[in-house]
Each structure stands twice: as structure tokens, then as C-alpha cells.
Image: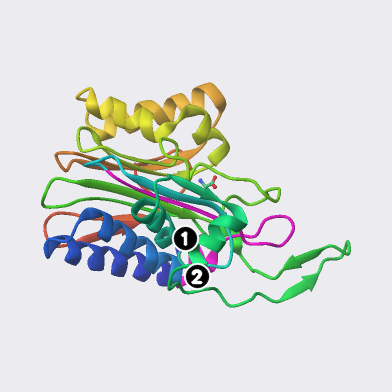
Amino acid sequence: MSPAQRTCLSDSLVHAFDMLWEGLPSICAVEAAICSLEASGLFNAGLGARLQMDGIRRMDASIMEGHHLQAGAVAGIEGVQHPIKVARLVLERTNHVLLVGPLATRFARGFTMKFQPRVGKARTSKGGTVHKKPNSEELETVGAVALDRSGTLAAGASTGGIGVMLPGRVGDSPLIGSGVYADNESGAVSMTGFGESIIRIAVAKEITDRLAGGISPSPAARFVLRKLVRRIQGSAGALVLSRTGQFTIRHTTPHMAAGYWNGKGRVVVADRFS
Ligand code: ASP
């Protein structure tokens, strides 16, 4: 993790925690944390999102709250700076959960919304067309989970997808139960990693089901991530928060840049968790 990423993660945690401290709902804190990561261009989301093989940046995001189990998501959205805001608009302004592709983009245009500057194009040696974007492999998907004073949990995720992907590919991040889940009766989960494996195990829901069964976040996440590796050689990382505020970060990937508020007035940020 670069120093700039570390500072950005830490600032977004402080800001989100202040919101919770002031009594704002967890969904606002989750949205705000993800927004600042999307705006930084330092992660694989929003301004830093990866490009698909045709050189187009199509992004996925979702957000869910655990009181009424309301959720909103977008997949394959283009041009917006904050896919997570559009996901929340889907949750709050429509009767739907998921909008996709150009029609999700058109939906976003109906609101006051920041759009991304156009990216310049470059010719590849094979004559195809790609956008220039150095070091995108090092950028990571962003996500957040939070619990507010009223006991409501929220989870969200925002991504530009994986390293090499066909145009139109959609990962786990906008799929409720795969990339995110939040239920006040169990917990909140936000996933990162190889979406094709996370979807097949419905990881976020599988972890929250274990929390509902009384297992704490750490063993619940460990069990499901082990299953992901054992059954389908998947790889992923999870942010897991229980309804009582117990928390873990677990990953089978070599690194996972993440952080949390440690409950003693301090933010902890690292790129590896055991
Ligand atoms: N889970 C994201 C996806 O498959 C990618 C990531 O987390 O890095 O689209």
C-alpha cells in the first residue's frame, strides 16, 4: 500500500467514524467512506477503476442496510465519479435493487452527479484501442461496513472489476449476497477478490448466515473463505461486522489494504491481516 493510499484510507475512516459519532445512519457512513476512496483515483473504483478489454471503464457498486434489508446496486455503469451514490439512489428512489449498463448511466444522469473527465486513448501494438492507465493491477476494490447508534448495520462495495475482463463482465460487488450483505439480525459483510469465485459461493450471505447462527466474525469468515479455496480454488478478502460490533478482516489473497476504528480512539490501517 502506498503512503497516499494509507492516508486516504485513514482519512476516510476518520470521516466515517465522525459521522457515526454524530449519530448519522450507518448507510451514510458507508457511502461517505466509499465516496472518498472513489474520488481519490488511488483504488480500483470511481476515478481509479479498471478498464474492460475494449478500453471502456464499466463499474459496479452496491449498498445495503440491515434494518429493512433495503439494497441498491448498479452494474456496468459508465462515466460517473461515484457509482456508490447511484447505488444508493437505486435503493432510495426506485422499487428496484439493480440497474445495469447504459440505462444505469442514464438513470444517474437524472440526478445531480459528478461525471468523470474523458480518458485519452492510445493505440496498442496490435492495433487495438486501449486507454492509458499505469499500474492499475496494484489498485484494489473498495468497500465498507458500519454499525450505527440505532443498531443498524450497513455494507457497501464499489469496483472497476478484475485485471482482464471481457466487455460486459460483472463481478460480485453489485450482487447482494455475494459481494455485500447486511442484516441487523446477523451482521454486515463487504467482499473483495476474484468475483467469479465469490459469486459461486454467495460468500457475503454465507458469512452472515453463520453470524446469525451465533458464530463470531473471525471463525465465520475463516470457515467460508476456507471453503472458497477448498471447493473452487477461489481467493477473496472480507470485512465482517457482527450486530454486536465484533469485527474481523480476513483474506486469502496475499494482501488486503484495509482499516478499522479500534474503539480506543485510533484508526488502524494495514495491508495484511491474519
Ligand atoms: N470483486 C471484484 C470483482 O470481481 C474485484 C476486486 O475485489 O478486486 O469485480
The secondary element bearing badge 1 is classed as helix
Quadrant of the drawing holding the N terminus: bottom left
Q: Is residue 97 visible?
A: yes
Which portion, as a residue range, is magenta? 40-65
Disc ID at residue 178: none
Mark 1 neighbour class, 10 Å CA radius: few under 14, some 14 to 19, many 20 or more: many
Residue 104 percent coordinates (x, y): 54, 56
Q: Is mark 1 within 8 Å of ligand 1?
A: no
Q: Which residue is mark 1?
A: 83
Labels 2 and 1: the sequence-earlier one: 2
Q: Secondary structure at mark 2?
A: loop
Q: Is residue 41 magenta?
A: yes
Q: Position of residue 19 (x, y in %)?
A: 19, 65
What residue type is disc 1 on?
A: Pro
Estimate the spatial distance between the alpha carbons at disc 2 and disc 1, rounded to whole Å.
13 Å
Query: Which of the 4 image quadrants contains residue 120?
Result: bottom right
Q: Nearer the viewer, residue 104 or 184?
A: 104
Residue drawn at point x = 65 percent, y = 60 percent: 51
Q: Is residue 257 visible?
A: no
The residue at which mark 2 appears reads as: 41
Image coordinates of residue 137 in percent, x first then y, are 60, 57
Look at label 2 and name its amino acid.
Gly
Q: Is residue 111 above or below residue 175?
A: below
Asked if residue 138 lies left or right of residue 10, the reply is: right
